[in-house]
Amino acid sequence: MECIATLSATENLTKAATLSESLFHLANHDFTVQITRAFLKIENIHQYEALFIVDMKDFLSEKIRDVYKKAHSIKSEFNCDDFYISFKFMPYTNILNFDSIQSDGFTLEYNSDEEKKGN
């Protein structure tokens, strides 16, 4: 798919959120990699960074590779001069400091009521 220039901040933010949401659901459902939380950081009007917190067992498993491949595929399809998103994954631990994650600029958190209900 060809990258279509989207110049407005709202359009780019919506695109970043939609792509992150899509990867969240694909990981949890299609690849059975449990992502417990997802955050989005706005670098500027054109650049975004998504951070996914992954269950430690899944983070250390081979199946995380499929999620990385899908993330790379999404980046290849949608990144261009006017829009750039990166995806990062980190394992969940009991000492993970979510205040630090927010301090690093990941101020938007994806909230999936469906995931919390276990559907």
Image (cartoon, helix red, strand yellow):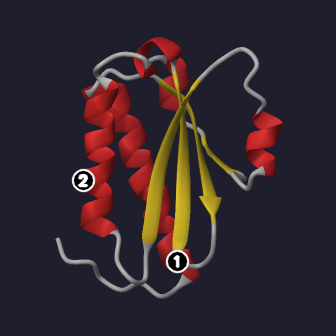
Residue 105, visible in the rendered structure = yes
Residue 119, visible in the rendered structure = no
Dividing the picture into quadrants, the one containing residue 19 is bottom left
Q: CA distance from mark 2 to mark 1?
A: 19 Å
Q: Secondary structure at mark 1?
A: loop
Specify the quadrant that holds the C terminus.
Answer: top left
Looking at this view, name the residue that lies furthest to the top: 57
Residue at point 34%, 77% (across, down): 80
Dividing the picture into quadrants, the one containing residue 30 is top left
Looking at the rendered structure, the kind of residue marked 1 is His
Q: Is residue 81 above or below residue 113?
A: below
The image position of residue 28, as x and y in percent, is 37, 27
Q: Secondary structure at mark 2?
A: helix
The image position of residue 71, as x and y in percent, is 33, 47
Looking at the rendered structure, the kind of residue marked 2 is Ser
Specify the quadrant that holds the N terminus.
Answer: bottom left
The residue identified by callout 1 is 46
Q: Is residue 93 above or below residue 82?
A: above
Labels 2 and 1 touching (C-beta < 8 A): no
Residue at point 76%, 19% (across, down): 95
Residue at point 32%, 35% (across, down): 67
Left or right relative to 76: residue 112: right
The residue identified by callout 2 is 73
Q: Which of the labelled discs sits on residue 59, or is there none?
A: none
